[in-house]
Image (spheres, helix red, strand yellow):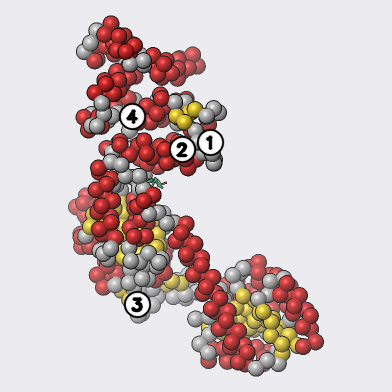
């Protein structure tokens, strides 16, 4: 429904026009005072302001400037007598969208309102398509070299075609949000909106209105009717991030959407039907929350129709090299992609990433920004990686060496043992179950001297510094 505000100091003129537009299905208000008009525009949104040009309180041009400031998306139309057409043209140069010469047949106004509505729809559609493109993340953009991620992608591809609810699980930074976007973009709903709601970031008191909307006056501060996210996402997808944070009283209402496809704005007596696909995500232990009765079991079952688990990065190390390449490209300005020194690469391959892909991404950005040469050194990496307690690394446990050549494995073991022994060769050799001489020999054989030298540098610096 198009909303129009008519401002004309001739009270009769504005009220007649408002009545006619209301008959056409518009939501029309009118006032004879430009100041009052501005006050209303501050309180609610109007698609169109239809204003006289010459008024005692304020000129149409001044009014236009102020409306543009308060509500840039409002279309401003001026009405004027034939004698001041020139001024009307001036206002168009300043941003008015059209003008009407008084007296005008009412059909001319109706036509204009229709035309503006069509162009507004087009604008909104454009904006939405731009949003879709901006947030588009297809499975092709996702790194999935590891067998675990290939399984995840295969599963996502299958469920995308259906309407089933999906629950994405995984530690922070494992890619739940990008996977949700990819599922939406591969689903038949791809041209419809994808609305992301971060349930953990919105205060409990606002969450209900965010999700389901409200009607004007239903609580203090509800100054106009407002659509909720479910309505906005109608025929599309809602991504409920951090679903584990949703308070219990809203869990019931959420269940109703999932079961009945019904929502109710706060303060509205009538429910409305919506058609949405729900993808939820959590890094919490929902089963535990169900056991503690902080998460409803029926809701859990509804959401958990198709669970997809994103494994932590340290359990799918085969993805690390491809992610590194991806992020080096992303953060290096065109042309000169920076390289990693063998030692820096080695640390990145062995680190455990409690923050998963996001942590790796940040580490690469950090390194690219800090490194002065074309080659990124270990000292350019974030401290939590440089100072990582390698003895606790999951790197040397069986799974990660799968697919490595035997001499590679041996090299990695030697480096890890040295790291753990803080480069005391005797201790490292003991740890490896070989003599110190054999260790020396292997180091030479594999040409590890330079790497060791560079790995030791930060340690020395720490000693010298403190
Ligand atoms: N498979 C992937 N390939 C490439 N980039 C990825 C992949 N997965 C995640 N990313 C990138 O890693 C970062 C974190 O991903 P995302 O925000 O989806 O994680 P999340 O699981 O939602 O994290 P949180 O629980 O902290 O919200 C993003 O910048 C994303 O682009
Ligand atoms: Mg997320």
Return the residue nearer the eye: 40 or 434.
Answer: 434
Q: Which residue is mark 1?
A: 336
Residue at the disc numbered 4: 350
Q: Could you tell me which secondary element the residue under label 4 belongs to?
A: helix
Residue 272 tag number: 3
Mark 4 neighbour density, 10 Å: few (under 14) some (14–19) many (20 or more): many
Quadrant housing residue 290? bottom left
Spatial separation of the CA atoms under disc 3 and disc 1: 55 Å
First reached walking from the N terminus: tag 4 or tag 2:
2
- Residue at 62% over, 75% down: 75
Q: Is residue 345 visible?
A: yes
Left or right for 76, reference 394: right
Residue 399: x, y in percent? 22, 33
Whether the residue under disc 2 has CB within 8 Å of ligand 1: no
Give the SS element for disc 2. Answer: helix
In the rendered view, would you say 355 is above or below 341? below
Left or right of 226, for residue 29: right
């Amino acid at each position: 429904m198009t909303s129009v505000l008519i401002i004309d100091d001739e009270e009769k003129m504005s009220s007649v026009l408002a009545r006619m537009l209301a008959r056409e299905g518009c939501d029309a208000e009118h006032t004879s005072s430009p100041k009052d008009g501005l006050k209303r525009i501050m309180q609610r949104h109007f698609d169109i302001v239809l204003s006289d040009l010459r008024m005692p309180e304020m000129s149409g041009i001044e009014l236009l400037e102020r409306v543009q400031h308060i509500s840039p998306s409002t279309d401003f139309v001026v009405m004027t007598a034939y004698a001041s057409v020139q001024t009307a043209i001036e206002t168009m140069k300043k941003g008015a969208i059209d003008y009407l010469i008084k007296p005008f047949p009412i059909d001319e106004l109706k036509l204009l309102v229709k035309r503006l509505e069509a162009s507004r729809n087009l604008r909104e559609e454009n904006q939405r398509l731009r949003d879709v493109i901006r947030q588009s993340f297809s499975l092709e953009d996702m790194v999935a070299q590891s067998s675990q991620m290939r399984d995840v992608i295969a599963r996502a591809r299958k469920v995308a075609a259906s309407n089933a609810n999906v629950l994405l699980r995984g530690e922070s930074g494992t890619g739940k949000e990008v996977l949700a976007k990819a599922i939406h973009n591969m689903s038949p709903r791809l041209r419809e909106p994808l609305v992301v709601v971060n349930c953990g970031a919105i205060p409990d008191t606002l969450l209900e209105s965010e999700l389901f909307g409200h009607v004007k006056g239903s609580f203090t501060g509800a100054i106009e009717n407002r659509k909720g996210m479910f309505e906005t996402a109608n025929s599309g997808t809602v991504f409920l991030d951090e679903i584990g944070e949703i308070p219990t009283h809203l869990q019931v209402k959420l269940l109703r959407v999932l079961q009945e496809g019904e929502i109710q704005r706060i303060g509205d007596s009538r429910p409305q039907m919506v058609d949405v696909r729900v993808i939820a995500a959590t890094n919490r232990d929902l089963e535990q929350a169900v056991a503690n009765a902080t998460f409803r079991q029926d809701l859990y079952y509804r959401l958990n129709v198709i669970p997809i688990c994103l494994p932590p990065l340290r359990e799918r190390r085969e993805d690390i090299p491809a992610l590194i390449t991806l992020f080096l490209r992303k953060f290096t300005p065109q042309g000169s992609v920076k390289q990693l020194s063998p030692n820096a690469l080695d640390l990145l391959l062995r680190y455990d990433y409690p923050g998963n892909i996001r942590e790796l991404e940040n580490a690469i950005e950090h390194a690219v920004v800090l490194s002065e040469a074309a080659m990124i050194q270990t000292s350019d990496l974030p401290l939590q990686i440089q100072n990582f307690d390698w003895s606790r690394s999951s790197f040397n446990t069986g799974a990660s060496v799968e697919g490595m050549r035997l001499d590679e494995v041996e090299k990695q073991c030697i480096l890890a043992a040295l790291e753990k022994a803080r480069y005391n060769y005797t201790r490292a050799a003991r740890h490896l179950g070989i003599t110190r001489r054999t260790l020396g020999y292997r180091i030479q054989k594999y040409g590890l001297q330079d790497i060791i030298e560079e790995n030791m540098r930060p340690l020395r610096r720490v000693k010298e510094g403190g």
